[in-house]
């Protein structure tokens, strides 16, 4: 250790001088890696966003649990068979499924670097997402006009909370989607925008996964 | 995961250096979509036509279809695999599934007797002011 020494804390090579003064105890403590690594910008975003989705999953699990507990408490009010229209739900499901595949096409266009194609597929996705929301709002207004408001029974409270929370997620997904269309238009498919599109892709497909649970447990099982 | 981002052509950068997961291919999306359509259509058909007379059997069958479809979405649309982010996405997913199963089954189990000690009510609640 005469010419160059490795600084135990920063890992950088330092030449001679003060490092000779390091005591033996300090050198042993150097097993702790306190050095700041070189993290690429946004390198942990995808994992972080996945963690968010998993916690969102827990929110929906609680709402499903509430529906499971309260789903039979009609308070002598209307039940699922009086209220739900399966053809409408099937149409809604189709809209969400179409929006999922068109978002997939947007991701493929993004990979090829086609800016215009990416924006076009994003807008197609937005049309299907908006159609989903319109059908859901139509269903909600019909229910409320029939007197099946969230205040009517425990079943309806749980129903509106669960399906409404999902609809709210789709609404925010749409706002995010339009934001990204504008951002891609202004700055192009830069790495930051690609990362954002990847996150929204996870979010959008995740909402479709939640909808599978909704149409199976709420609508289909309710009509049995 | 290379930290060298000073690539001459940004489009040529291997997309695997930004994150662990893949994007999937056209084939993958089409297969996932077709599977989803089939896995959605069958439960709707079962319930709307009442093809299986026994309700409990129908419920179990459509639940099985839902679980299969969720797995299909995870693989073909969310591109889940055990290697992305060094396996941390799968670890987080498994942890979430454990919590969800405990919360759901626990809630249903504990609250199953929710209405047991209620007064029996045979009259119509809608006539109560």
Image: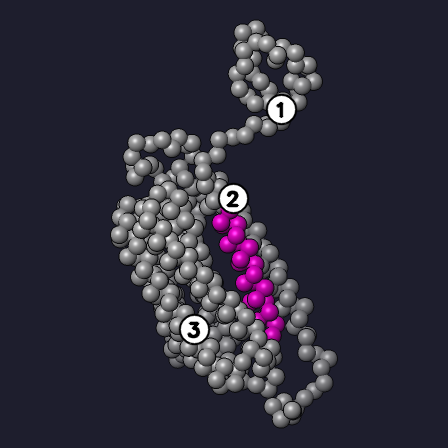
Q: Position of residue A97 (x, y in %)?
A: 37, 64
Query: Which residue occupies 62% across, 24% down?
Result: A31
Residue B111 position, x and y percent, is 66, 71
- What residue is drawn where x is 49% and y is 49%? A49
User: What is the magenta segment's predominant secondary structure?
Assistant: helix
- Chain letter for the residue marked with disc 3 in the picture: A
Q: Is residue B20 above or below residue A20?
A: below
Mark 2 lies on a secondary structure that is helix
| Helix, strand or loop at mark 3 | helix
Does mark 3 fall on the same chain as mark 2?
no
The residue that label 3 is drawn on is A136
Subunit that carries the residue with mark 2: B
Which subunit holds the residue at mark 1? A
Q: Nearer the viewer, residue B9 or A25?
A: B9
Q: Which residues are magenta?
A: A48-72
Q: Let me know if residue A196 is in the magenta part.
A: no
Label ID, residue A31? 1
Give the mark nearer the N terminus: 1 vs 3: 1
Q: Which residue is mark 2?
A: B88
Q: Nearer the viewer, residue A192 or A183?
A: A183
Indicate the position of residue A124 as horizontal and vertical percent values.
31, 61
Disc number lying in front (1 or 3): 3
Mark 1 in CB contact with mark 3 (< 8 angstroms): no
Foreground residue, A49 or A175?
A175
Report whether B105 appears left or right of A107.
right
Instruction: Please give the name of the residue rendered at 57% of the width and 85% of the height, measured from the top-left corner.
Output: A77
Name the front one of labels 2 and 3.
Answer: 3
Is B68 positioned to the left or the right of B104 in the image?
left
- CA distance separating discs 1 and 2: 25 Å
Q: Is residue A158 above or below residue B2?
A: below
């Amino acid at each position: 250790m005469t010419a160059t020494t490795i600084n135990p804390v920063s890992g950088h090579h330092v030449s001679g001088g003060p490092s000779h003064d390091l005591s033996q105890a300090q050198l042993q403590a150097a097993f702790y890696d306190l050095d700041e690594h070189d993290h690429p910008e946004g390198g942990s975003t995808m994992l972080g966003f996945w963690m968010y989705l998993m916690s969102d999953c827990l929110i929906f699990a609680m709402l499903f649990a509430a529906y499971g507990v309260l789903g039979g408490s009609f308070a002598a009010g209307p039940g699922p068979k009086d209220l739900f229209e399966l053809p409408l739900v099937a149409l809604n499901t189709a809209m969400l499924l179409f929006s999922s595949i068109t978002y997939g096409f947007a991701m493929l266009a993004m990979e090829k670097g086609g800016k215009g194609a990416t924006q076009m597929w994003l807008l197609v996705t937005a049309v299907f997402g908006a159609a989903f929301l319109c059908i859901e709002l139509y269903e909600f207004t019909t229910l409320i006009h029939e007197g099946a408001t969230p205040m009517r029974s425990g079943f309806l409270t749980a129903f509106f909370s669960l399906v409404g929370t999902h609809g709210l997620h789709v609404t925010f997904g749409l706002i995010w989607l339009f934001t990204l269309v504008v951002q891609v238009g202004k700055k192009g498919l830069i790495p930051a925008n690609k990362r954002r599109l990847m996150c929204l892709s996870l979010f959008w497909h995740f909402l479709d996964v939640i909808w599978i649970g909704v149409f199976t447990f709420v609508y289909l099982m309710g009509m049995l | 995961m290379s930290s060298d981002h000073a690539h001459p052509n940004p489009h040529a950068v291997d997309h695997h250096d930004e994150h662990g997961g893949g994007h999937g291919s056209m084939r993958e999306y089409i297969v996932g979509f077709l599977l989803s359509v089939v896995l959605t259509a069958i439960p709707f058909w079962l319930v709307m036509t009442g093809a299986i007379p026994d309700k409990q059997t129908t419920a179990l069958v459509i639940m099985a279809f839902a679980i299969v479809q969720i797995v299909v979405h995870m693989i073909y649309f969310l591109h889940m695999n055990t290697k992305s982010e060094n396996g941390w996405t799968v670890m987080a997913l498994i942890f979430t599934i454990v919590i969800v199963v405990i919360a759901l089954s626990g809630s249903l189990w504990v609250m199953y007797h929710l209405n047991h000690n209620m007064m029996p009510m045979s009259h119509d609640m809608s006539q109560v002011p």
